[in-house]
Amino acid sequence: MAWYAASVVVGYFFRSQRIDPVSVEENVVLIDAEDRETAMGSALKLGLNYAVDDPTLEIDGKPAVAQFIGIRKLVEICGPVNTTSDEPIHGAEISYFTYTVENRSDLDALMRGEAVRIRLDE
């Protein structure tokens, strides 16, 4: 058995119309599976649970719906540096993102929580 981290992507849309921009939530969930294929199947099943038809769901006071978009990424968990364990223990790498920013100034702004343009490299 191995542990995987699955990035489950959910989109939130107004019920009355599907307009831009889309509010997106990416949830990283743990999966315990025998292999990558089985992990992906489990991740898809978990992802479908995020698509709920809740009549009380609202975005900015307007009725909305949550839609499961898909699994953006599935990675096998790596143990902490200098260990032999790949179990989810303190310090284990659950998931990662690789992206590019235009320059160091944008990187500094990103670290301050400011909005900057990035290119997702994965």
Image (cartoon, helix red, strand yellow):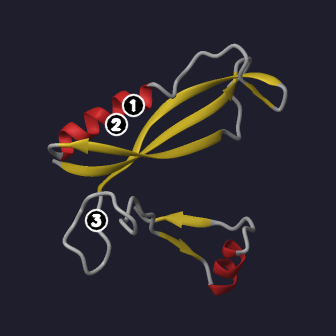
| Residue 7: x %, y % from top left | 43, 47
Amino acid on which the number 2 mark rests in the picture: Ala
Other residues around mark 1 within 10 Å, as few (<14) / some (14–19) / many (≥20): some
| Residue 19: x %, y % from top left | 71, 31
Image vertical order of residue 83 relative to residue 61, above or below? below
The residue carrying mark 1 is 46
Does residue 104 appear left or right of residue 94 in this picture?
right
Cα–Cα span, label 1 and label 3? 22 Å
Front position in the image: 91 or 31: 91
Q: Nearer the viewer, mark 3 or mark 2?
A: 3
The residue carrying mark 2 is 43
Q: Residue furthest bottom?
A: 104
Label 3 near label 1: C-beta < 8 Å?
Answer: no
Q: Residue at x 54, y 36 (%)?
A: 10
Amino acid on which the number 3 mark rests in the picture: Cys
Does residue 86 appear left or right of residue 22 in this picture?
left
Cα–Cα span, label 3 and label 2? 18 Å
**Earlier-in-chain disc, 1 versus 3:** 1
Q: Residue at x 81, y 23 (%)?
A: 62
Cα–Cα span, label 2 and label 1? 5 Å
| Residue 93: x %, y % from top left | 37, 65
Label 1 near label 2: C-beta < 8 Å?
Answer: yes
Q: Report helix, strand or loop for mark 2.
A: helix
The residue carrying mark 3 is 78
Image vertical order of residue 54 relative to residue 74, above or below? above
